[in-house]
Amino acid sequence: MNPVFDWHALAPDVVLAATVLLTLVATFLLPDRDATQVSRIAAIGVLAALVPVVTLANDGADRAMFDGAYVVDNYALALKAFFLVAAYVTILLSVDYIQEGDYYRGEFYFLLLTSVLGMSVMASARDLITMFVALETISIPTFVLAAYRKHDRVSNEAGVKYYVIGVLSSALMLYGMSLIFGYAGSTRLAEIGAQVSAAGAPPLLAVAVFLSLVGFAFKVSAVPFHFWAPDTYEGAPTPVTAFLSVSSKAGGFVALLNIVFFGFYGVDGAGTELWWPVIWVLAALSMTLGNLAALRQTNVVRMLAYSSVAQGGFMLVPFAAAGIAGAAGDLGQADTAFGAVVIYLLVYGAMNLGAFAVVIAAARRTRSAEISSFAGLFQTSPTLAVLMTVFMASLAGIPPLAGWFAKFVMFQSAVEAGGAWGITLAVVAGVNSVIAFFYYAGVMRQMWFKEPAGEDRSEIEVPYALTGALAITAAVTLVVGVYPQLFARVGELAF
Amino acid sequence: MIAALDITPTYYLVVAAALFTIGGVGLLVRRNTLVMFMCIELMLNAANLTFVTFAKALDDIGGQVIVFFTLVVAAAEVAVGLAIIVAIFRRRQDVTADDVSALRG
Amino acid sequence: MTEFYRQYLAVAVFVVAAFGMVGAMLGLARLLRPTNPQDEKYVTYESGADPLPLFGQANVRYYIYALLFVIFDVEAVFIFPWAIDVDGLEWFGLIEMTIFIGVLLLGLAYVWRKGLLKWA
């Protein structure tokens, strides 16, 4: 008996997989020193994979395959679209960097797209096996990408640290999954949820859930499992850092969304007290320590690394909120919280990729990632300075930019969850939004009020690809901020 | 037949838990990168043993399938890890985690 | 003596017999053969290849082959379940497996084009 295939639903992933193979073939058939052809194939493949995503969204029906292990619904499609667009922007960020660097190799795009394929599958995964394979497909290529400048000691170190932490988190998560499988008697997330609700909270199940959550906490670099992130982000090539801090992190969050909402949340909210305190602590620590550490940074990439740890904390808030509301028997809140995480992910992706695009553009002149190297950017390159201001202000959550809307839905979920713990978490998030403003404003101060350091005061030349990346990310950041209704529909996604 | 011991799934689970702990402690204590890789292998295989035990006890094939994937993933991880180590090794003589310290977190 | 211990007695008899057999053969050979010691005879490989030191560093070239072996070897695990049910999976299974092996061959082709299969 053969399984039934819905080829339309599989089309985005099949197109992406075919592109991955094409880039590999192109890498060894085309001349070694020319990666532009490979980058074109990669970019076209990513855009081609978006076509079936759009037709599926038009169709609107939920499609489940393989006994419910692989599901294509609106939530999966929204995230597939996000991962593909983020991949396209990452390719735009990388083209000139790779071409001008020491390693003109097409393998870069092969590794990048393999990781994106894992993310696309992760959006549809509703089964422990599928999730594990998807998560490893995301992670393994990124270990190589982090160490991509292979003669550079710092890049090597970034790779080793990321590798050891990544593999350790996989092992913890896998062991947790094996115990969960033992309890639930199934690898399907839906059945796991039913069993968690029925079983209450036996101690060993708590251990299993805790182990798998710690594994995911490493992946999304939540405090206290974040220590690898600043080192890896600083050492890796900057476009790779952008990819790690946006796509790879989002991949981890999608995995967490799947396992928490489709699995642990269960059917009637019973058993949520098993996991929400863990996520509550992770969220509060990530926001606070991430922001405090970011305040002290003088290197803009390290600052963005700690800022992304803090932003990850904000994204964890709705998870805890859903658990608090669920334990109190208020099941309606879970949909709000679920939508809030998805919105925050999409918005964070746009503004953080944009910030990295400006960093890469500015570093073409200054060859430096120090915050002081942004001094007087407004005098030399006003457009870049204005764009950086937009992205920094959006990350800080200032209206009317997209980051403000994302923060708003995040606060909404925490406040509506109610209870002492929900309100406390909202207060912690509020205080941290204020702290965060200071270090984002620090970059703005350098750009607007300082004198440029170097002799060369001509405008920084930005290549076409980088201009495209800046345009896409800036458009999303501005338009979503002014018309939140565009993404508000995403917030109506039920799980 | 030797029937003095009745081997129940619990025995396998205890062995797996012990393997996982040994791997975890080894990862934290040992500084040699290659030994750290071995410890990670130990942890992954502890998870495999747990999966197989439950698959047998619950009569659910899913637990055995995931072991196949874990084996392949572990092989791919080791390949990537060794490749990164060799990249460092080409310029340095020994590989201990303490030497990897140009970046301080 | 219980049935349980009698079973172990059988194991013990086998162990003694095994050691006795090997000892008798080697002892008999020692009595009958001529002795004419030379250094070359004590080398591990009489073909002439020098053995590597036990705890020395192996050449980094070996690692590529070890890795290639491990990766392609482990992939074979997916072929076994398919082989058991070749008839049941019909053409669909065959096409799936062809694609799977094709992807692996692409990897091998990449390694070959990059010149890693040459013992340089």
Image: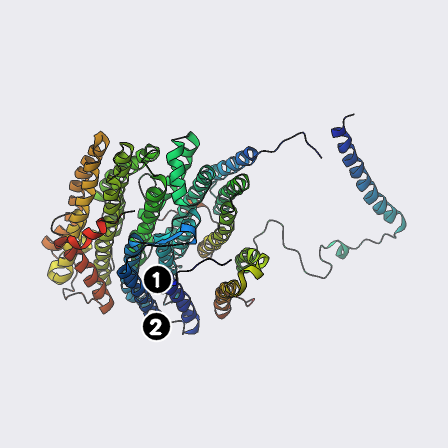
Query: SS of the residue at dot 1?
Result: helix
Q: Is residue C6 above or below residue A39?
A: above
Residue closer to the observer: A16 or B100? A16
Q: Chain of mark 2?
A: A
Which kind of residue does numbered mark 1 sit on? Pro
Mark in front: 1 vs 2: 1
Q: Position of residue B101 (x, y in %)?
A: 38, 46
Q: Position of residue C63 (x, y in %)?
A: 54, 57
The image quarter in which residue A257 lies: top left
Q: Are marks 1 and 2 on the same chain?
A: yes
Which kind of residue does numbered mark 2 sit on? Gln
Q: Quadrant of the N terminus of chain B?
A: top right
Asked if the residues shown at circle 1 and circle 2 are in contact, with their CB atoms under 8 angstroms apart, the answer is: no
Q: Which residue is mark 2?
A: A37
Q: Which residue is mark 1?
A: A12
Local packing at callout 1 (Cα closer than 10 Å; few below 14, some 14-19, many 20+) is many
Q: Position of residue C62 (x, y in %)?
A: 56, 59
Q: Is residue A310 visible?
A: no
**Extreme-top residue of the structure:** C1
